[in-house]
Structure formats: C-alpha cells, structure tokens
Image: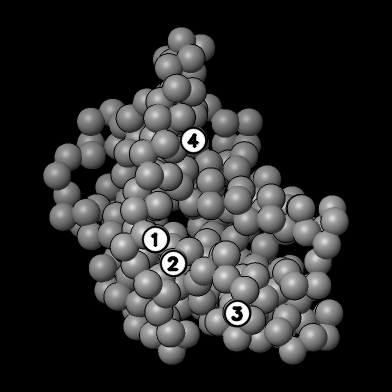
Amino acid sequence: MVFGTMVVAAGIIPSMSTRLPLVGSADAIALVGLFAAARMFMTLAAMDVGTAFGTLGARREMMVGFLAEPALLMVIFVASQISSSTALPVITDHLASGHLGLSPGLAFSAVAFILVLLAENARIPVDNPATHLELTMIHEAMLLEYSARHLALMEWAAQLKLFNYVCIGFALFLPWGVARAHIGPIGLAVAIPALAMKLAVAGAALALIETVSAKMRVMRIPEFLATAFLFA
C-alpha cells in the first residue's frame, strides 16, 4: 500500500508534462492526502510488528507528519493564490507562462518547502537514513523487521517519495522545461533532459546540505518544522 500510494502520487505530479493521464485528480491537497495515507500505512505496519523500536519509530514519524503537513499545505496555498487553483498542472502552467516573477511569498515558501522536504524524507538534519543507532532512528526504526522483497518495496517507496517531493518543488518553484498542454511531443522531448538536469542539481544540493549539517536531537524537530510553517 505504501508503494502503491507513492506510484499514484508520482502519476499526478507534473514532473515532465502538464498533460497528465490523471489530470482530473491532480489536486495538490489530494496529493498531501496521499502522502498522509502512505504514512498511516507505514506506521500501522510498524506498530503491528509489536517491537519497541518499530513503535518508537512510528510515533516519531507521526509527530513529524503532524508538524510537516500544515507547513506543506501553506506552501501549496501560496502557489495556488497566484494561479487561483489548487490543481498542480494549472499551477505549473500558470507559473511557467511568465507569472513566476520575483515574489517574496514564493521565496519564503521555497525555503519552507526545503525544510519540509528534509523532514518528510528522513534526511539530515532531521533523521539519518544511514544510522545504526536504534534510539536515534525515525524512518529506519520502522523497517528493522523487514527483509527481502518487502524491505525492497519499502526502500523503493522511500526513494520514490523523495523523487515526488523534488518534483513538487520543481513544479512550484522551477517550472521551466515542463511540457505544457499546447506544446506537443516536441516539448516532451525537451522536458526529459530538463528534468534530468534539475534532478542532478537537486541531488548535489541535497548532498551539500547533508554534508554541512549535523543531525539534531528529536526534541528540536518541532522547532525545525515550526520554522518551516512560519516561513510558509
């Protein structure tokens, strides 16, 4: 279920084109609901195992989600006010057609979105996906009892979630290179290398952030996400 929700989420994000097969359901608020559903499935599965670390990770994951989702919704509301719509293809098409400009609201929302991305995807400084210290784990604590194909699907879902969040950031703040509905197949041929280039830059930026940052204590996470909400 976790992997399935991430696949559906990837299908409604205009990462390469605004002419999506699921354009009728490509609403940003529904997308946040999909992420919340994936979190619910993951935490319920972790608590169903019955181990102490699984329950610990599930509780921490719900705390992060409880604090991150309002900030993410505020970021989406800022972008939707500019385009007068909460549909991601409409927002992307509106911003890519020359309405992006120098907006202080979008600038602050971009900072807030980066903070939410780090928290929601278990990246440093909120979490360390490569840690072996069980007491400091959040996301990995829920996966300690998984193995074989089940572990592979959960890890695949985590990577797909990171990809989805990065593509949301591109759609809201860097919509250039996305094939719009009136351009046609030529625009799609340009959109694929453009997405690859943006992903490479985003990966380098994420690596830089994790290199210069240290993991914070769990008690500091609410302050981190409250800062994201204030920026949004």
Mark 3 or mark 4, which is nearer to you?
Answer: 3
Dot placed on the residue nearer the N-terminal end, 1 or 3: 3
Q: Foreground mark, 4 or 2? A: 2
Please state the horizontal and vertical placement of residue 232, each as a whole percent of the image.
29, 65
> Which circle's residue, 3 or 4, is located before the other in the chain?
4
Residue under the image location 60 percent in, 51 percent down: 159
Spatial CA span between label 1 and label 3: 18 Å
Residue pointed to by mark 1:
210
Circle 2 residues within 10 Å: few <14, some 14–19, many ≥20 = many
Mark 4 or mark 1: name the one nearer the start of the chain: 4
Residue at the far top in the pictured view: 186
Q: How many marks?
A: 4
- Mark 1 and mark 2: span between their CA atoms? 5 Å
- Res. 31 image quadrant: bottom right
Q: Which mark is residue 124?
A: 2
What is the three-letter code of the residue carrying label 3? Leu
Type of the residue with mark 2: Ile
Structural distance between the alpha carbons of marks 4 and 1: 24 Å
Crowding around mark 3 (Cα neighbors within 10 Å: few <14, some 14 to 19, many 20+) is few
Question: Does residue 202 lie above or below 123 as drawn?
Answer: above
Is the Cβ of the residue at disc 1 closer than 8 Å to that at disc 2? yes
Residue 159 sits above or below residue 59 on the image:
above
Which residue is identified by label 3?
133
**What type is the residue that disc 1 sits on?**
Glu
Q: Nearer the viewer, mark 1 or mark 3?
A: 3
The spot of residue 60 in percent (x, y) is 58, 82
Residue identifier under label 4: 15
Which secondary structure, mark 2?
loop
